[in-house]
Each structure stands twice: as C-alpha cells, then as structure tokens.
Image (cartoon, grey):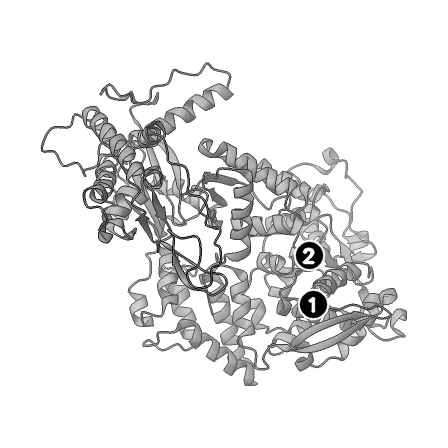
C-alpha cells in the first residue's frame, strides 16, 4: 500500500511524485493513473447498493478523508478483517467497486486511499443521493439505526428479476418491463414470484455465492439436502449462518421446522461453512493438541466407519500419535519411516490400515500432497541432485528400457533420470524425461502379449493362461510376463517421483485389483464394464438384461459358460445359458472379463514393481496404495490430456449463472481455442478434482459468479463440481487468471 516505487537499477525506494530515481537518475515508467470517473459513472455504481449499512460505511470512509485531509489514519490501510468492513463492504456485492471509483486500492487484506479529492467528492455526492433514496424506500425515520439490515436485499431482488426476464425470453415469452427501484422514493416492486418463495444468496466456503429460490415452507432438513446437492458438503458438516451481522445459526435440532419458522427472510444472505474442512485446517495448523482436536470434531448423524471422529481416532491409534502432540504430519512421517526401516509385516499391516483411514479423512484433498507424504518417508531418500542415465534404442524402445530398469537397484531408481537416445545428441533439461514416460506408456500398449486396450482407451492385462510365466522370444527367451509387469510397475513408480503423467491410463478394474477393492455385487461389476466400454455398447451392461428374456434379446441358445476357450466353471462349455441361470453366467462372465486370475497375478507383479521403488512389505503391502482410491491413481498416472471431444462432454453438463453469461462464453472459448489438452486437464482437475472425463465421469458442472474483478483468481469447490469466475472485463484477463490459478494453487498442505 506504500506510495512509492523501487528503482530497478539501484533498488532505492522513490516517491511516486517523481519518475526519476534520486540516486542514479534511472527513469521509471510509472503507469498513467486511471481516468477519473464521471459523476454519472459514480451514480450508476452506487445505485447498485441497497443496503443502508453498506451506504453508511462507505460514506463514513469517504467523508473522513475529505474532512481530515492528509491524516494517514483515515487513508488506510483499512483491514478487511474488521467486522464492520467485512459485513458492510467485503460481503456486499458492488461495495468494493464503489471504493475503487473513489480512488481506493485493494489487496487481499485491506483497502487504502490515495486521497484523490475529485474522486472522493463525486462518490460522496452519489452515496448521499442513494442513501436518501434507500431511506425513503424502506420507510426510514429520523433516529433509526442505519446499520440495521433491511428486510429485503433489493440488489438481490433486482438480479433475480433480471434472471427471470432472461429465462422468459429464452422460452419465447415477452419480457416483463423493468421494475428496478427508482429515484422517486417509491418502494421497488418485488420480483414476479410467489410470496411464499424465498430468494436467498448462499455464500460458499471458497468464496463467491450461489442464488437459490425455495419455498418458505421448506423444512430445514430438505434445505440442507439442497445445499448438499449444490456444494457437495454433507448436511452434518454444514454450518449455515445468517442475519445481520451473521450471528444466527441454522441448527440441526430445528431440522423439522420450516425456513420461515427459523427466521429466514426473503433476500437473506446465508454463509456456509464446511465443518469437516475447518477441522482439517485446525488439525494442520499445529496450534492444537490431538486431545484438543477431539473437542473440535464435527458432528456426525451416526457413529459409522466413515464419520470424522471414527476416522480420526483410527489414524491416531494406527500411528500411535500421543494426545499431547501438536504436529500431526510430523508424527505420521516418523512412524512411516520406522515401519519402512523395520522388517515387521504385522506392524506394516497396522500402518497400512491407518493410511487407508487417512485417505478417507482427506478424501477431497489434493492427491499430490498425499504422494509427498510417501516421498518424505522413504528410508532411502529421493535424490534430485544425482542422475540415473538411461540410454534408449528407439528401434526397440520397450525392450531396451525393460532390460535396463530390471537391472537397476533401488538406490538408482530413487535418483533423477537422465534420458538419452543411441546415436542422437540432446540435453535432457526435463523435456526428454517427460517425453520418456509418455513414450513408455505408448510402447507398453503395443505389447499385445501384456496389455489390451479397453473401449475407453485404458490398458488392461491380457489373459495369458498357462504361458504367462514363459519367456518371450523378443527377450532372448527371458523376460517372462511376470517380470515385465514388475518393470512396468517400476517405471510407473518413477513417474510419480518425477511428477510426470503417462500417455495412456490404466483401467479402473486394474486399479481396483492393485488396491484389493474388488466389486462385491453384480451391479458394481456392470458399472465397471460400462465405465471401460467407452462409446462401445455391451449388452451385458443393460439394466434390463436380467429381466428381459434371452429370446427377446436375440441370445437364446447362443451363450454358454465359457469364452474364447476359457471355462467359467468346470464343464462350462457344455452348459447353455438360460433365463434361469443367466444371472450366474453374467457374474462369471464379468469377473472373467475384468478381474480374471491372470489379471490379478499381473496386478500382484505390478504392485511388486511399485514396492521395489516406493517401499513396502511382502507381496501386497505397499503404503502408496493405501493412500489412494482407484480414481486417485488414474489421475496421478493418467494421460494428463483432455481432448476437444471430452471438452464437449464437459460443456454439455454445465449450467451457467445468468450473471456471468459473458465470462462463461469466454471460459469455453479459451479452453477450446487457446489451451492445449494438458492445460485443459489441469483446469478440469482444479474445478472438479479429477483430470479426466469419461462416459460417466462427470454428471454435472456449474459456473457461478466469484468475488472481485480482474485482480482476483477463479475459485473452485471440487466436491460440488463448481467453478467461480469473477466478472472479468475481457477474455484475455480471464485466460491469464485461469491459467495462473490452475498452475499455482493446490489444496491443504500436508508437509
């Protein structure tokens, strides 16, 4: 906020009144000041404010500077954390813009004025004029408290009415005449909605707000379910504050009451807090002991295995974290290092269960942070300052890589890769390494004796039968399939160390085999096949398959309990599928397709390759795998790209708030015309928590207005598939701020 500039040549701090450094004479290209707004511009901005408390606060800030010229305490900085400033300006749409017109500058923490008298006078005049209009509009009497909240937020009603007109136009109905509040002192007509309908604004934890229109007789429980649908925050983790200031809380013990009965009014602002996220934030702050954190655990409707308090207690027990401990993550890292160093399978089983609970506790947060927990706990440290040279022969890419990776020891695999190709000159500054991992997955997919491609384009192990352990002629009689799956696991583990994506994702059924989470029902099996089918249609995925006679499906007498020479049960080739036994046939058929014994053995070998690099015990205890769900691993290893076809699917499920129609149009134009596949994937990851879209990958997505203007970054709520875009002034600004957000922001810091 200092009125000064730093010389690029000698770093001396100079006054803004001078464009030449007083020490070295360097000329500073000081940007020209923004043009002074006209009186009409000030009036148009101030007319958007219909909150008496906000008008009073704005007028006080402006008048104090004019009445006390040159006094620093009135110029600022004026902290946003001040309760009055936060409630009257920060949280009121359009109020900050009025300060900008008055010459105030804004950053993340405060406002400050440059003392521009002309700007201040024009805004002061507009504020006094609007204050008079609003007072008359609300029946204001002398002696009333100006800071009290009016019954309606007229600014919100104007926006809702404008949206209703827009929707009516889309349906072909004639638009209603504008009914915005005028300057004659008359009350503003209410929007054309039922008196029993409440128009509410829901401010969500990541910033920005969502508008709702809901009957006043709606029960609190039903309202919480609607909030869950909009934001993804579970009802028992919701804390909804309202009133002015926001001191009232929508309590759980009033769930059977109506919104009208608990005191919600038309035009109300509700502030949503996610108690689960607040708990995790306190846990990571290091300010509270584990015993104190137990008093901060959010409520749960029942003491189930996935409720916060149960998960938290299980993690404390598994990692033996003391009740007086303050540093949660330090304690976990210490235990992990001990378990890695000790050869005790029993202890490893215990800590693996703890990691599984940890995954569930932090289920909505960035998978990369959980990956860092593993890297920070390796007994042999991951070293970037050393290099592991890998010389590849392009004509036999997979074979030359497999041979070298198989002969590496663990210490070598935990160092930075340096890639070169035989007969080619080049310096690996990172680009060759990234290209290597993408190329490896592409060449791996060409090894038809190891992998097959699903309809979705993912890789799944082939069914190799009895010959699975035999050598392959390409490897001189060596390099059986089991060894090659281990090599693939090693390369995929090294990709995680280098933070690189691979060119082809592995199938979700294969991920489930890696994690030992096989489906337990026929419906889950059908969902897995449907997920991997992509655009292909498989009759086994039909919801009515079991209810429809085989004759009607055209399959009567065409099926038996075997496929491609493999029998599902002994003598299956001679057992015909009938309407009576087709459910049993479907179970065996899908198991063989997705979770065959051959695929399970491939997963065991692949997992062993991960253990060779990232540590673990026995054939299946790899700590990495207990920290992630199948979708998490697909994101970590996935293709890292989002093509225009997937972009079209994403856009097709999007709903847009009418207040940012222009910004939404720019958003999709930027993604389609200016961002490449990888950057689109990063935007999707930022907005939804997943970097890929499939046939059933995204059911809904919303674009909502965000706080601020060109200086603010977009924000997202991944659990609700919601992205908030400030009202950017141009497509170029939106592009820059969107790219900055997706490339520089993360989630809860774990290390």
Frontmost residue, 697 versus 375: 375
Instruction: Read off the residue under disc 2.
Output: 505
- Identify the mark at residue 542; answer none if there is no mark: none
Evaluate whether residue 692 shows in this view. Answer: no
Instruction: Say which element carries label 1.
Output: loop
x, y percent for residue 166: 46, 23
- Identify the element where label 2 is drawn: loop
**Residue at mark 2 to residue at mark 1: CA–CA distance:** 25 Å
Using the image, determine if residue 517 lies above or below residue 735: below
* Viewer-closest of 587 and 324: 324
Number of disc labels: 2
* Residue pictured at 18% horizontal, 38% vertical: 148
> Residue 585, image x and y in percent?
70, 50
Residue 638 seen: yes
Q: Nearer the viewer, mark 2 or mark 1?
A: 1
Seen from the viewer's position, the closer of residues 303 and 63 is 63
Q: Residue at x 62, y 70 (%)?
A: 497
Residue 443's place in the image compared with 167, above or below, is: below
Q: Are marks 2 and 1 in contact (CB under 8 Å)?
A: no
255 relative to 39, above or below:
below
Compare marks 2 and 1 and give the one earlier in the sequence.
Answer: 1
Q: Position of residue 408 (x, y in %)?
A: 73, 79
Considering depth in this image, is 130 or 623 the residue closer to the camera?
A: 130
Judge from the rendering whether residue 448 lies leftward or rightward of residue 553; answer left or right.
right
**Which residue lies under the disc numbered 1?**
429
């Amino acid at each position: 906020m200092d009125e000064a500039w730093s010389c690029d040549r000698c770093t001396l701090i100079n006054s803004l009144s001078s464009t030449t450094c007083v020490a070295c004479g360097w000329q500073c290209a000081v940007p020209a000041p923004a043009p002074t707004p006209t009186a009409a511009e000030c009036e148009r901005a101030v007319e958007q404010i219909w909150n008496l408390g906000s008008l009073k606060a704005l007028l006080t800030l402006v008048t104090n500077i004019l009445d006390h010229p040159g006094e620093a305490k009135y110029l600022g900085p004026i902290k946003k954390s001040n309760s009055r400033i936060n409630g009257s300006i920060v949280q009121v749409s359009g109020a900050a813009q009025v300060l900008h017109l008055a010459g105030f500058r804004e950053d993340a923490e405060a406002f400050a004025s440059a003392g521009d008298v002309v700007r201040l006078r024009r805004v002061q005049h507009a504020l006094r004029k609007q204050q008079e209009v609003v007072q008359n509009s609300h029946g204001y009497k002398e002696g009333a408290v100006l800071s009290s909240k009016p019954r309606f937020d007229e600014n919100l009603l104007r926006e809702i009415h404008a949206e209703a007109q827009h929707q009516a136009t889309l349906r072909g109905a004639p638009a209603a005449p504008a009914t915005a509040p005028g300057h004659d002192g008359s009350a503003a007509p209410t929007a054309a909605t039922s008196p029993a309908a409440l128009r509410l604004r829901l401010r969500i934890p990541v910033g920005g707000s969502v508008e709702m229109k809901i009957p006043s007789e709606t029960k609190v429980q039903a309202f919480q379910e609607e909030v869950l649908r909009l934001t993804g925050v579970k009802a028992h983790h919701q804390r909804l504050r309202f009133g002015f200031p926001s001191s009232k809380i929508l309590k759980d013990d009033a769930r059977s009451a109506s919104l009208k009965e608990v005191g919600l009014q038309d035009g109300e602002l509700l502030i949503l807090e996610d108690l689960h996220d607040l708990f995790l934030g306190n846990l990571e702050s290091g300010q509270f002991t584990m015993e104190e954190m137990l008093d901060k655990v959010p409520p749960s409707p029942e003491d189930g295995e996935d409720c916060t308090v149960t998960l938290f207690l299980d993690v404390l027990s598994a990692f033996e974290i003391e009740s007086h401990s303050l540093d949660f993550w330090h304690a976990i890292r210490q235990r992990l290092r001990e378990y890695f160093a000790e050869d005790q399978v029993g202890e490893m089983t215990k800590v693996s269960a703890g990691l599984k609970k940890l995954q569930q506790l932090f289920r909505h947060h960035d998978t990369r942070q959980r990956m860092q927990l593993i890297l920070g706990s390796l007994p042999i440290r991951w070293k970037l300052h050393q290099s592991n040279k890998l010389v590849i022969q392009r004509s036999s890419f997979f074979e030359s890589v497999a041979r070298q990776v198989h002969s590496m020891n663990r210490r070598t695999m935990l160092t930075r890769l340096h890639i070169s190709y035989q007969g080619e000159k080049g310096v690996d500054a990172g680009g060759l390494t990234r290209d290597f991992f993408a190329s490896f997955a592409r060449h791996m997919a060409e090894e038809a004796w190891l992998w097959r491609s699903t309809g979705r384009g993912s890789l799944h192990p082939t069914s190799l039968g009895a010959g699975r352990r035999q050598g392959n002629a390409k490897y001189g009689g060596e390099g059986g399939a089991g060894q090659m799956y281990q090599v693939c696991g090693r390369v995929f583990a090294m990709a995680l160390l280098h933070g690189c994506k691979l060119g082809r994702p592995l199938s979700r059924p294969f991920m489930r085999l890696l994690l030992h989470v096989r489906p337990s029902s026929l419906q889950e099996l059908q969902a897995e096949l449907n997920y991997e089918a992509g655009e292909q249609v498989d009759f086994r995925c039909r919801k009515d398959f079991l209810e429809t006679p085989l004759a009607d499906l055209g399959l009567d007498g065409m099926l038996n309990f075997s496929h491609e020479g493999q029998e599902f049960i002994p003598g299956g080739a001679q057992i015909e599928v009938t309407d009576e036994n087709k459910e049993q046939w479907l179970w065996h058929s899908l198991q063989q397709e997705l979770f065959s014994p051959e695929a399970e053995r491939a997963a065991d070998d692949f997992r062993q390759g991960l253990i060779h690099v990232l540590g673990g015990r026995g054939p299946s205890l790899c700590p990495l795998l207990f920290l992630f769900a199948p979708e998490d691993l697909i994101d970590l290893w996935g293709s890292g790209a989002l093509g225009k076809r997937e972009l079209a699917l994403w856009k097709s499920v999007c709903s847009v708030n009418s207040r940012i129609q222009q910004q939404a149009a720019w958003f999709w134009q930027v993604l389609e015309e200016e961002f490449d596949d990888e950057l689109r994937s990063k935007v999707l990851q930022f907005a939804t928590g997943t970097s890929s879209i499939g046939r059933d990958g995204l059911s809904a997505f919303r674009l909502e207005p965000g706080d601020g203007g060109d200086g603010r970054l977009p924000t997202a709520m991944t659990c609700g598939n919601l992205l908030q875009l400030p009202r950017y002034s141009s497509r170029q600004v939106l592009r820059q701020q969107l790219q900055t957000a997706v490339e520089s922001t993360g989630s809860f810091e774990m290390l």
